[in-house]
Amino acid sequence: MTRALAFLAIVLAVGLSGGCGSSPISSFYRLKPEAPPTATGAAARLNVVVSPVTIPELVDRPQIVVSLADNKVWPNEFQRWAEPLKGNIQRTIAGNLAALLGSENVSVFETGASATSMWRVRVDVMRFDSAPGDAATVEALWTIWPPGQSTPIAGHTLAREPIQAQGYDALVAAHDRALAQVSQDIAAAIQQRASR
């Protein structure tokens, strides 16, 4: 009986001392608009709503999912998105479009503008790849419904941004730049149709 108690005491001591070690600390990241303001004048009157964005289920989680060699991926438990990625991408694209179109009327919600003056944008993200030390890749299909028109404008953007430094800050910044490219293509299509 004494040996069993001594063994139990040793196991408890080892378990308690192992629990006193420090755990890794999680870091939280968010995407942000990167597009520089470029438009003025008539574009400022555009009313644009960016609909909810779709993303691959693989990356629809709090962890940043990184791509490894041989088709392997790894959800990093300690490098996380500060909010759901879908909503963060949607707001980032809306922020980019506001800057690119020079309009304060770009939103992720219906703003009350009449349907005859509202441009609607839908973005389906097909790839959202994160390869630390290499590149961030965003591939998106996007559709724009001009106001009062039944025929949409469809487009595709494949943006691959090299990562300019080590670490997750640089990876997230590369995703910001890739989403800015997606936004630039959408803004160019809106401007071209609006100028007709």
Image (cartoon, grey):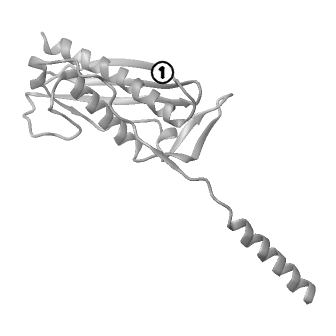
Tell me which corner region of the image, top left, top right, bottom left or bottom right, holds residue 51: top left
**Residue 186 position within the rendered picture, expressed as x and y whole percent measured from the top left:** 28, 20
Q: Is residue 127 left or right of residue 21?
A: left
How many residues crowd around disc 1 within 10 Å: few (fewer than 14), some, or many (20 or more)?
A: many
Q: Is residue 186 left or right of residue 132?
A: left
Could you tell me which residue is drawn at 48 percent across and 21 percent down? 161
Callout count: 1
Between 122 and 178, which is closer to the camera in this rendering?
A: 178
Q: Is residue 186 left or right of residue 114?
A: right
Between 38 and 184, which is closer to the camera in this rendering?
A: 38
**Residue 35 appears in the rendering:** yes
Task: Assign the C terminus to one quadrant of the image.
Answer: top left
- Residue 97's place in the image compared with 41, above or below, is below
**Residue 41 position within the rendered picture, expressed as x and y whole percent measured from the top left:** 9, 18
* SS type, badge 1: strand
- Residue 86's place in the image compared with 17, above or below, is above
Could you tell me which residue is drawn at 57 percent across and 35 percent down? 66
- Label 1 amino acid? Glu
Could you tell me which residue is drawn at 59 percent across and 27 percent down? 133
Q: In this view, does 174 lie to the left or right of 53?
A: right
Tell me which corner region of the image, top left, top right, bottom left or bottom right, holds residue 135: top right
Q: Residue furthest top?
A: 196
Tell me which corner region of the image, top left, top right, bottom left or bottom right, holds residue 166: top right
Could you tell me which residue is drawn at 39 percent across and 19 percent down? 157
Q: Which residue position is annotated with label 1?
A: 161
Task: Assign the N terminus to one quadrant of the image.
Answer: bottom right
**Residue 54 position within the rendered picture, expressed as x and y whole percent measured from the top left:** 38, 36
**Residue 148 appears in the rendering:** no
